[in-house]
Every structure is written in structure tokens, then in C-alpha cells.
Image: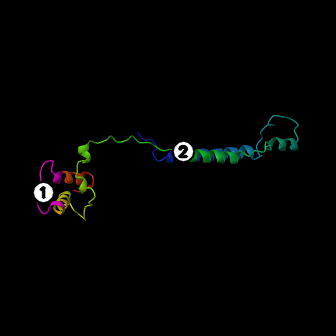
Amino acid sequence: MLVDPDGMFAISLLILIFIAGLLSSSSSFAGNGQLAYAGVPNISDDEKRNMNNNDSGLNPVPALLAGTVILVGSAASVVVELAKASKTSQSARATNAPSWSLGEPPRGNETAQEYATRILDEKYGQGNWKKGANSEYSRIVKRAQRHLGLK
């Protein structure tokens, strides 16, 4: 069962997390919040400014941007692997058509029967071939219907 085959939900979720991170980081690092001196009496304005400044030299917004870009990139590169289809039988794949008939493409709106008749007439001459069970005709028709998609 595929929950999010194209990954759009994951990318949308990461974008929302990124926006929420920007909003929260802008309010806590902008210097307008009361960070460390909420209940401290007799603190000067200079000390308040120093407490609000980010003295580490690191700006959290670029780090948040880089982290989000990495997460979005890795989420977009996730490949959803589907289960392989079971191998069909040789008769269903029509593997027993004559090898000399494999390179001949159908013409226009030919049906599988017209296609087989034309190929056999070209090889053996008009009507000099057999129709019936396990004949070249039936094997070419089967391959045309199953492999080439003719009706």
C-alpha cells in the first residue's frame, strides 16, 4: 500500500515545519523579547541589550534553512519501490513465435490475423502455409495480440 507515492505530502509537511521554525526563531532571536532578565531587579538597558544579542556569532536562520533544504532534498529523492510483477508463463508471453517473424512490424490498422497472413504469404507464397493449433500462423497471431497489442 502506497501512502505518499509522489512525496508531495512529505514535502508540504517539511515546508510547514520550516515556516513554523522561521516564525519561532524570528521572535526569539530578534532582540525584542525578554529572554534572561524577566525577574531580575536593577538591570541596566546596556545589560539587557547584551543579553538579547546573539554573542555566539551564529545566526540560526541560515542553519534552519540549510537543514530544511537537506530534508526536502532527501524527501524528494526517496524512491518508492513497488513490488515486481510476477513472471508470466511462456505461453502467456508468446515466446514461441518464429524468429524470422520478430523483425516485421505491423502495417497501419492491421489485425493480428491480417498481420500473420501477410507475413506468411510473403515468406511461403499465397496460401502455402497451414492454419491450426501450434502452427506458425497461430503462434504469430498470438504474439501479435499479446506482445504487439493488435486485435
Is residue 111 toward the left or the right of residue 45 in the image? left
Q: Amino acid at mark 2?
A: Ala
x, y (%) of residue 92?
Answer: 24, 45
Q: Amino acid at mark 1?
A: Trp
Quarter of the image for residue 43 reads: top right
x, y (%) of residue 64?
Answer: 66, 45
Q: Which mark is residue 75?
A: 2
Q: Tell me what residue is drawn at x 81 percent, y 34 percent.
A: 39
* Residue placed under numbered mark 1 in the picture: 129
Q: Tell me what residue is drawn at x 17 percent, y 59 percent.
A: 120
N-term mark: 2 or 1: 2
Is 125 rendered above or below residue 75? below
Q: Is residue 65 magenta?
A: no
Closest to the observer, 97 or 41 = 97
Neighbor class of circle 2 (other Cα within 10 Å; few <14, some 14-19, many 20+) is some
Q: Tell me what residue is drawn at x 16 percent, y 54 percent.
A: 137
Q: Tell me what residue is drawn at x 77 percent, y 39 percent.
A: 35
Q: Which stretch is magenta?
A: 123-138
Is residue 32 toward the left or the right of residue 116 in the image? right
Closest to the observer, 124 or 93 = 124
